[in-house]
Image: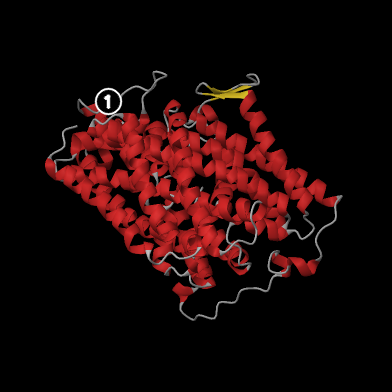
Amino acid sequence: MKLALIDYAIIGIYFLFVIGIGFLLKKKIKTGNDFLMSNRNIPLWITSLAFISANLGAQEVLGMAANGAKYGLYTTHFYWLGAALAMIFLGIYMMPFYYGSKARSVPEYLKLRFDEKTRTFNALTFAVMTVFSSGVSLYALAMLMEVILGWDFNVSIWMAAGVVLAYTFLGGLTSAVYNEVLQFFLIVLGIAPLVFIGLDKAGGWEGIVQHVADAKLHVWKGLDDPAHNPMGVDLVSMVFGLGFVLAFGYWCTDFLVVQRAMISRNLNDARRTPIIAAVPKILMPVIVILPGLVILALQKQFQGFELPTAADGSPNYNMVLPTLLKNLYPNGILGVGITALIASFMSGMAGNVTAFNTVWTFDIYQAHIKKNAPEKHYLYVGKATTVVGILISVMTAYVARGYNSIMDLLQLVFSFVNAPLFATFALGMFWKRTTGHGAFWGLISGTLAAAVTHGLTVAEGKGGWLGQVHHFFSGTSQAFTIAWISFVACFMITALVSLVTQPKPEAALKGLVYSLTPRQHDRSKVWYKNPLWLGILVLAATIVLNIIFF
């Protein structure tokens, strides 16, 4: 790909701008709470955009375009089934617990509801997951720089890691959040014209229908049997595995996104944050999935849109967006498009690193190593943890090179961590009889069930390290199955152990369990300030979209 001076100038200005934000915010960061939690002083419109942008990293922009080409419109289930309903549930039912408990993180809420060992186990697994996700974003960014700019992969990794380190080290979570808002607009402005140009060149939606296999142009049709759809998923795995377990496990318990709502100025803003974010979320497939269908149509009509092959000989679907950029954007606009991709990768990486340093500092270091140190001390620990998180992310970036769709890899990671965690939360928040021992052994059992299922099954050459009992059509179908199995295992063990162990007294559970928490009555007479009405409108729009593309 040939870049002109103006393209490099746009990329350079972006790097300087994001680092500049870190320098501007540095003087406001005086305590560990400022660095790690923004002192709960971020306006609603910023938390809402940051909420969606924290998830708008490499796994979404690059990974969903890859899955759009690989699986077609079935990928929209990650939005219309696997996001909207869970985001509404988080805002209406779960944020009162998170925000009202004054917990600084999801693991800290687990400590208040259950006990220290449950908190520590979740903190450790979450820390592993975040640096893994951060590494995926870093890998994608380095791959982009290697392919588009011609830079060495290793040099690209360290350069990208250095830029993210600079602005997160200087401004902490606040810097990451404000950059996420900037990155959201960059992603939309940089990728939307690409979709429009590509769709026009392919002959509009009629050209898509004419040149793309019909099996990839539906959302629900073909889910009666894994062999009848390109994702290789049946209805149970899709609805229960993705729509319930993975969706609610991610959006309702993953501290990376929950943190963006927890730093709101008040409870009402915290509740509305994920619901308002759901509005652009359900529209995002136009920008991140449609390019995958566009490139399939263009491959049938023109030369030069073929994807390079991955290490296993299959098409490298991660190259969908770079290939479209190379063929469709002229210089100048090309620089904006590349900057949009870079922004998405840095957004995902910074979001994971800031979540990692908060959990490590509060839930591991302060809880077990040094409990009563001055705030200044935790500021230094948070900054040091940021450096360590970046370094570990560099190592995990190399692991991601073995997958031809980074979204498949991340769904697998989520099935190990978020799926069993949601079972713990579902029982803990709505059944006061749930105990700390039950939650802890349930999480252990769910994680082990995920490991065993992965070890006994194979998908696209991955897994099967304990034997090959079953072969899945795709990595996605394997991840969905692992998710619901780990959820069920955790749910059952948590319930059984809770029945034979002593629960906390009711007085200690007020504000932490639904039946013992005063109901939230929104006194606002304006409908758009009421989380319930907002949630109903978003849900209705989502149902309509599912019907249209049935």
The quarter of the image holding the N terminus is top left
Q: Colour mode?
A: secondary structure
Amino acid beneath label 1: Glu
User: In the displayed structure, does residue 339 sit left or right of residue 426?
Assistant: left
Q: How many marks?
A: 1
Question: 153 or 257, which lies in front?
Answer: 153
In the rendered image of this protein, does residue 417 appear above or below residue 181?
A: above
Q: Residue at x 24, y 28 (%)?
A: 305
Whole-percent x, y for residue 374 in the image:
57, 64
Asked whether residue 171 appears in the rendered view, the answer is yes
Question: 245 or 34, which lies in front?
Answer: 34
Question: 307 or 179, which lies in front?
Answer: 179
Q: Residue at x 20, y 27 (%)?
A: 302
The quarter of the image holding the C terminus is top left
Whole-percent x, y for residue 93 in the image:
60, 64
Whole-percent x, y for residue 354 in the image:
47, 52
Q: Residue at x 19, y 38 (%)?
A: 328
User: In the displayed structure, does residue 117 sit left or right of residue 127?
Assistant: right
